[in-house]
Each structure stands twice: as C-alpha cells, then as structure tokens.
Image: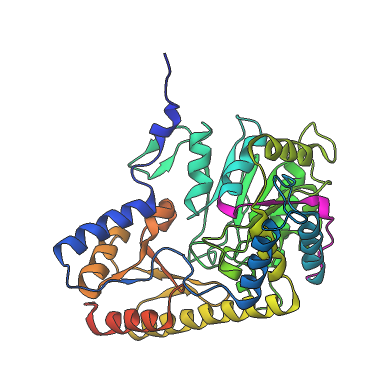
Amino acid sequence: MAKVNKNYKKLAAGYLFPEIARRTREFQEKHPDIILKKLGIGNTTEVLSPSVIEGLKRGVNKLAAVKTYTGYGDEQGKTELRRTLAEYYKSNGVELTPEDFFISDGAKPDSSNIQSIFASESIIAVQDPAYPVYVDSNVIAGRTGVYSNEKNEYEKLVYMSCTEKNNFFPDVPDKKVDLIYLCSPNNPTGAVATHEQLQLFVDYALKNKSVIIFDAAYCEYISDPDLPRSIFEIDGAKQCSVEINSLSKFSGFTGVRLGWTVVPEELVVEGSKPGEVRSLWNRRQCTFFNGASNIVQEGALAVFSKEGLKESRELVNYYMNNAKIIMEGIKAVGLKFYGGVNSPYIWLKTPEGISSWDFFDKLLSETGVIGTPGSGFGPGGEGFFRLSAFGHRKDIEEAVDSIKKNLNL
C-alpha cells in the first residue's frame, strides 16, 4: 500500500504566501469596491530590459534554424554562461572557475534541493526570521522534528536569533551544527552582513566541518562598497560554503527563471575530499534536472553584457527609490523600521500590543494595503511586518499615501 511522506504533515499550517492570498481574497469578496495596493510578496513588476529582450529573441531564433537548433543542453549550464559568471564574480574581487557554477531555474529550488546531498541526520541552523523555504524543505526531508504551535518553532532546528539588539544578524551557534543557512541582504529583515560578521561564521564552519548555504539573491541591491556581496569575499569560505544566486530580483527574471549555485572544488565536509561535494551536486543535477532553458540562458548572457548590466542596475535603482518612498511614509506615521537601504525590503515594527497577523488585517482593512506578517518567517518575526519595494511607482505612491491618510495609530 502506498503511503504519503508523513513529514509533509509536520509543516506549519498554511504556507505564508497562500495564507496571505486567502485572507486577501476573503477581504476582496466582502469589499469588491476597494482597490487593493500590494506591498507584500517580493515579485518584480517592471518590464525586462531591451538587452534581455534581444537576448531572449536570439535564443528563440536559434531554435528556429537547423544549424543553431539545440535540444537538451548541459545539466550544468552553457559553458559560455558559466565563464561569464566567473568573470562577473572576478569583477567583484572573487576568483572562481566556470566549473564551480551550476545554472538552474532559480534560487528557490536550489535552496531547497541543495540540502539533499547532505546526510539526513544533519543538524540545521537558520537565521530567525528566515525565508520559509530553508525551513520547509528540511521539514519535508525529516530533519526538523515536530512543530510546536506554542513556541512557533520546530524541535530539532537551531534558530539563530536576529533581533533589534544584534541589528538582525545572529551570533554563531553555541553548539555544533552541520548546515547553516544565511541570507544577505536578508529576506525579510533587509539586514546586510559585514565582512567581520561573515568571517566569524566561516571560522566556525571550518572548525566544525559545517557548510554555510549562503543566499545572495539580493546582492546587487547593496550600494555600500564596504559590505560584501558574496560569501567568497571572506577568507576560507571556499572550503566551507555554497552560494546561491539568481537574476529574479536583479534583472526581473521572476517569471523567466534563471539562477545558479556555486559549489567550489575546495569545499569539504567531514570525511570528504576536495571536489567530492561538487561531484555530488553535479550528480544530483544530472539525475533530476535537464538544465535551464536554452532560451533563458541567452537572456542571461545578455544581462552580463556591458549594456545589460547597466540596464539591470537601473532597474535596481528604480526599486530602491520605491524603498525610499516607503520609508519616508512609514517614518511620517511614526512607526519604527529597519532595512530598505541596501535591500528592497523594509522591516517594520508593529505598534505595541499588535501581533503580525493582526497588523496585516488592520493594514488591509484600514488602508487597502497588503504586506507580509513577520511571524510567517519564524518565531523571531513576531511583532514585525515586511513591506516590499517591488511595484510600479504609481502603485507604491498610492499605497504610501493611503497609509499616511488612513492608518489609525
């Protein structure tokens, strides 16, 4: 008799974003005349840049001619794109080889899939609050134990607390863990780790034969030149780290889908040799993945052209100007907030005595604005609320104006 994977039943009730959609739908059914304003899910809104469009067209045209038609590509990605990514990292002072890169259809699936090459008994540490996929993928893999509604946490997970007191970047674990999930700039808090903070984690990982899974999907939003954009800017990181990245938020590829994971040859874990972990990830990709779209990879190559980088960075500036508008509005109503400077997310502190989900309902009912409750990102998110700078300028301005005029504090 077939049986389901019981670990799915351990998932906390209601994935964050579907729950937001459910509450929003119910509100809209009761108030059909209200035009909702979305500052919630981090989904890009602006059109792809001219260079990217031309790159995608080239990809389509290649499939329309016998001489340039391609079927299955390399599971690791086009050699040209992997070389281009190595050059992109080199321009930021990081030396990697094309063989270190594995092209995929996005950072989210890689964040989930990467843990499959590590032992099932691995002890997992996550920033708290954290992007839900880090936790949920390990719940499904059976590493987390059961969920406690009372504590809003899983019994076997190590939660690395991110609070106002530590500027939303955690201390290293006080016991041995195996896999450490870090995200910088952080989703949801908007905090960015310094070189010194990341060095502490690298030193810990080297000492304990741990692996850091570093999500750098928002690295292009860092404008401060003194802040690291890659874990591999840190001494020793190649021996203990994997980096995951994406073009979703940099170039608007949320619906196009293109990401990559960096697994250096130097990476070792307990009982392994250099190159062995990378070989396992390669085997995993060759077994379960037929490679990113040939068309999309042509669009990605266009991103890293001189003009493509310029256009993508203009897109980032557009969203960061949205963040400024949101921050000015939140400041005007007297609410405390963090982030929004080197990140497209504003981490708002809810008014005293109001829970994250209660503030969601309050904001929606009074202003028609949709945000993201902090508690959906873990126990440390309670009492906070995420606002996103992704949106059309007019919509951002209308949302902020409604908050300033209608939010009853």
Horizontal and vertical percent position of residue 382: 37, 57
Instruction: Say whether residue 151 is magenta.
Output: no
Horizontal and vertical percent position of residue 25: 24, 58
Q: Residue at x 14, y 62 (%)?
A: 30
- State the residue in front, 56 or 34: 56
State the extent of the magenta-drawn residues as a range.
Answer: 92-108
Rendered position, 342 above or below 384: below
Q: Report whether residue 244 is seen.
A: no
Q: Residue at x 20, y 62 (%)?
A: 27
Q: Quadrant of residue 49?
A: bottom right
Rendered position, 307 above or below 351: below
Q: Quadrant of the N terminus?
A: top left
Q: Quadrant of residue 398?
A: bottom left
Q: Residue at x 80, y 71 (%)?
A: 91
Q: Residue at x 68, y 70 (%)?
A: 303
Q: Quadrant of the C terminus?
A: bottom left
Rendered position, 332 above or below 56: below
Asked if residue 182 lies left or right of residue 83, the reply is: left
Asked if residue 6 lies left or right of residue 33, the reply is: right
- State the residue in front, 203 or 122: 122
Horizontal and vertical percent position of residue 380: 44, 55
Rendered position, 138 above or below 110: above
Q: Report whether residue 239 is seen.
A: yes
- State the residue in front, 68 or 228: 68
Instruction: Say whether residue 105 is magenta.
Output: yes
